[in-house]
Every structure is written in structure tokens, then in C-alpha cells.
Image: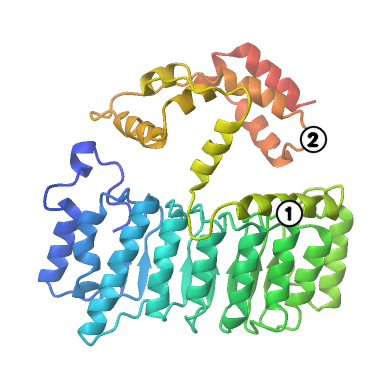
């Protein structure tokens, strides 16, 4: 049932008093006496509101036999994530009470903004069910508190084979929390921590955790984590001694040419030369490992300032920091006034409910007859790109893509010939 809700007009997607389409689907399955083993609701804009209808289905005997639950890109948000977990916990409790315990094996929920509240509550479910084999939760804005809860819960699932937390904000602190539980995951075959801001300290923590543990590990993904040479070598050496290992993915880190050679030498010495992935997107080494370690210490000091057990969302943390910056005085305004003149001062002037106000306004910007076409003024974007492409850190692959894109006719871009010409000049310099 993936994609069934995409493209609906507001009147079609709006929940009915009795729960709308999700309730009808659940009622139909219940009347038919169905017993599902796989439920795929991916790529539907369910959100927290849609849980009113899904609650009936997810807590019914229809889902007692679920083995795979696929909920990718559903826009749950923290509130929806908590409600989803509550449904799963209730389903498990009912199934145990009825003598047919739920034995979910695979849970997938990526790109759904679960954040820490959703992760913490889902961890409670994983701790109860104890049958998980595959958990995939990428790009959910989960910080170290949520990662710690997930790691502790999943360590009580002895059959866990696949753990994917890529593109969350673990940081070294989250990596250390995960590292404490990794040795207990004896069946682990795939560990994906790409793009999680682990840095050198986090990579070392993972290396120490898998050294001599996780004997069945097949794939280790730690790409795009600002990992430096010494930490990458530690990872390769820690991964050695496994006949099952087929891939060590360390691309997009801060190794530099000499660092890449050092990692390759370490892999060859460990008998892992054939398992090492490519390094086409590697970045240059930082000035020194000490400089990076100092930055990591500063970040973690800031994280430690939060009181234990109290969750502060990433957005609110950033807003609080912005409010304290000198020179930014909030200017009280309405959403309409902010959209006409979007500035940092006006954004702060929307008050503590700015996120909800802007979200509500965004959801109202929709053409129900689907005949309206949005036109964009990209002049500012072209000017910004002209400056950005001249910087040494601008990726070469993106430069090539822009050259191809701008060499072809495009009505949106061609209305700004001067800005397009300057950008093309910068791209071909």
C-alpha cells in the first residue's frame, strides 16, 4: 500500500470523523480475518494525524503475525513516532495476552523526522518484542540520547543482523553509547553509520567495540563522518580477522592522499584489500587530529549542558542559541509579514510557536484544482552559486553537474542571462 496517499487533494486526504481511509482499510482486513506478515505503508503522507485511523489496524489481530513493517517516508514527526510506537506496544501486549506473541523481525522507518521522542518510545517496543533482525531508521534527526536508548534495546534482541542509522546526528557521544551495546550483538552482519558526524573519536569508539566482537560482520559503513587517518586505520585493523567481511566503506572522510594510502596498506596487511570501498569523494586531511579532537570536546561540552533526562529538540536548541547572539533583536510579526520580509529578527519575532505557525501556513499553500504552476525567481540562487563554485571545498562532481545543467535551455534560468553568464564563467575557470 505504498504511495496510495501521495497526490491526493486536501479534501481526499483529510481524515474523516471515524478515521477515514486507514480505518476503512483496517476494518476490511479485520472483517476478512486477514493475518498479515508484511505491511508496507511507505511514501504516504500519514503524519501524526493519520495515526487515528492506523491505530485500529496496528493494534488488531491482523498485525499479530507481522514480520516486516515498512514505514519509509511517512512524515511521522516526533509526535507521530511516539503514537506509532504506542500502537506497536499495545499490539504486542494484546498478542501476548491472546497467546500468539507478535514476532516482528524487520522495522523500516526512514526520512520520517522521528527525532529523539520517537526513537525513545520505539526503543521501548524493541525491548519488549526481542525478535528484531533488521532495523533501518535513516535520516530521522535522532541525537545521542535516542541512539543510546535504541542501542540498549536492540542489544536485547539476540537475532539482530542489520542495523542502519545513517544520516542521524550521533556525534562521538552517540557513537560511544552505541559502542557499549555492539559487543552484545553477536549476529550483527550489517552496520551502517554513514553521515552521522562520528568524527575521529566516534570512529575509534566503534573500532574498539567491534575488535574481537561481532564475528559475523559482513558490511561496515562509516562514510562521510569526518574520520581522520589514524581513526580510519584503527577501524580497518579492528575489522580484520573475519572471513565473512565483504565491505568496509570509508569514503567521504578526511583522509587525504597519504591517509588513503595508509588505510589501503592497513587493509592489505589485514587481508582486507578486496573489501575496502572506493575513495572518490574523500576530503583533505584537517590541519591536525588535535584540532579536530578539540572541536569534538567543545561540542560534547555543549551537549552535556542539557539536563539529564530532558529532551531539547535540535531546532529549539538552535533557536535558543540564535536568540542569544548579539545584534539579533526579535521583531514581532505575523507569518505573512515574515514571508514578505524573511529575516532572522522576524523569525524570532514569531514566538515560541514559530515552527507550528510556518508548518500550518505551508500546508495551506496548495492548489486543489492542480492547475496552478509555481514560478521561481532563481536570480539570488545563481549569484550565490557563482560565489560558492569558486571556493576550494566545492565538490567537483557538483561542478560537472551544474555545467551540464546550465548548458541546456531552461526557462527559469534563462530569464537571468547576466547571472547565468557569470556562473558559467566561474564554472569553467
Badge 1: residue crowd in 10 Å (few <14, some 14–19, many ≥20): some
Vertically, is 280 above or below 34?
Answer: above
Question: Image quadrant of residue 174?
Answer: bottom right
The foreground one among 279 and 252 is 252
Q: CA distance from mark 2 to mark 1?
A: 27 Å
Residue ID at (19%, 71%): 60
Q: Which residue is painted at 63% across and 76% down in the image?
A: 218
> What residue is at 73 percent from the left and 53 percent from the top?
296
Viewed as shown, does residue 7 lie left or right of 245?
A: left
User: Residue 39 lies in what quarter of the image?
Assistant: bottom left
Q: Secondary structure at mark 1?
A: helix
Q: Which mark is residue 335?
A: none
Q: Residue furthest right?
A: 258
Marks 2,1: beta carbons within 8 A: no
Of residue 33 and residue 342, the one placed in the foreground of this image is: 342
Mark 2 or mark 1, earlier in chain: 1
Residue 395 in picture, x, y percent from top left: 72, 40
Q: Which residue is outermost to the bottom?
A: 99
Q: Which quarter of the rendering shows the N terminus?
A: bottom left
Residue 229 at x, y percent in the picture:
83, 60
Foreground pick, 303 / 254: 303
The residue under label 2 is: 392
Q: Position of residue 96 (x, y in %)?
A: 26, 83
The answer, for residue 289, to whether it is visible in the render is yes
Q: Quadrant of residue 419?
A: top right
Q: Height in image: 24 above or below 379? A: below
- Write down the residue under mark 1: 297
Element type where label 2 sits in the image: loop
Pick the residue in front: 365 or 145: 145
Q: How far across and how far down the image is residue 293, in percent?
A: 78, 55
Amino acid at each position: 500500500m505504498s504511495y496510495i496517499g501521495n497526490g491526493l487533494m486536501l479534501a481526499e486526504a483529510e481524515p474523516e470523523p471515524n478515521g477515514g481511509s486507514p480505518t476503512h482499510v483496517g476494518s476490511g482486513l479485520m472483517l476478512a480475518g486477514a493475518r498479515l506478515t508484511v505491511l508496507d505503508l511507505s511514501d504516504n503522507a500519514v503524519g501524526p494525524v493519520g495515526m487515528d485511523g492506523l491505530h485500529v489496524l496496528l493494534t488488531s489481530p491482523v498485525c499479530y503475525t507481522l514480520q516486516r513493517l515498512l514505514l519509509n517516508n511517512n512524515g511521522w514527526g516526533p509526535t507521530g513516532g511516539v503514537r506509532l510506537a504506542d500502537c506497536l506496544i499495545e499490539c504486542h501486549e494484546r498478542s501476548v495476552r491472546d497467546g500468539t506473541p507478535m514476532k516482528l523481525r524487520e522495522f523500516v522507518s526512514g526520512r520520517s523526522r522521528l527525532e529523539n521522542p520517537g526513537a525513545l518510545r520505539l526503543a521501548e517496543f524493541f525491548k519488549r518484542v526481542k525478535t528484531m533482525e533488521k532495523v533501518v531508521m535513516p535520516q530521522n534527526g535522532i541525537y545521542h540520547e535516542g541512539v543510546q536508548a535504541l542501542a540498549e534495546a536492540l542489544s536485547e534482541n539476540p537475532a539482530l543482523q542489520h542495523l542502519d542509522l545513517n544520516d542521524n546526528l550521533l556525534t562521538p557521544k552517540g557513537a560511544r553509547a552505541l559502542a557499549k551495546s555492539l559487543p552484545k550483538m553477536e549476529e550483527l552482519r550489517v552496520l551502517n553509520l554513514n553521515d552521522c558526524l562520528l568524527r575521529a573519536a566516534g570512529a575509534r569508539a566503534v573500532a574498539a567495540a567491534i575488535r574481537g566482537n561481532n564475528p559475523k560482520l559482513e558490511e561496515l559503513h562509516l562514510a562521510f563522518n569526518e574520520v581522520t587517518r589514524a581513526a580510519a586505520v584503527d577501524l580497518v585493523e579492528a575489522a580484520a580477522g573475519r572471513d565473512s567481511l565483504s565491505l568496509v566503506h570509508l569514503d567521504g572522510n578526511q583522509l587525504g592522499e597519504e591517509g588513503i594510502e595508509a588505510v589501503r596498506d592497513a587493509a592489505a596487511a589485514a587481508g582486507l584489500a578486496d573489501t575496502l570501498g572506493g575513495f572518490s569523494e574523500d576530503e583533505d586531511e584537517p590541519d591536525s587530529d588535535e584540532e579536530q579532537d578539540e572541536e569534538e570536546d567543545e561540542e560534547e561540552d555543549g551537549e552535556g549542558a542539557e539536563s539529564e533526562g530532558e529532551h531539547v529538540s535540535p531546532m529549539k536548541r538552535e533557536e535558543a542559541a540564535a536568540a542569544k547572539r548579539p545584534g539579533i533583536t526579535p521583531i514581532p510579526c505575523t507569518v505573512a509579514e515574515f514571508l514578505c520580509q524573511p529575516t532572522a529578527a522576524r523569525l524570532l519575532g514569531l514566538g515560541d510557536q514559530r515552527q507550528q505557525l510556518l508548518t500550518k501556513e505551508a500546508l495551506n499553500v496548495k492548489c486543489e484544482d492542480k492547475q496552478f504552476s509555481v514560478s521561481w525567481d532563481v536570480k539570488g540562487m545563481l549569484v550565490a552559486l557563482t560565489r560558492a563554485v569558486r571556493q576550494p571545498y566545492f565538490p567537483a562532481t557538483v561542478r560537472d553537474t551544474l555545467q551540464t545543467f546550465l548548458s541546456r535551455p531552461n526557462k527559469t534560468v534563462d530569464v537571468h542571462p547576466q547571472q547565468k553568464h557569470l556562473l558559467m564563467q566561474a564554472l569553467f575557470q
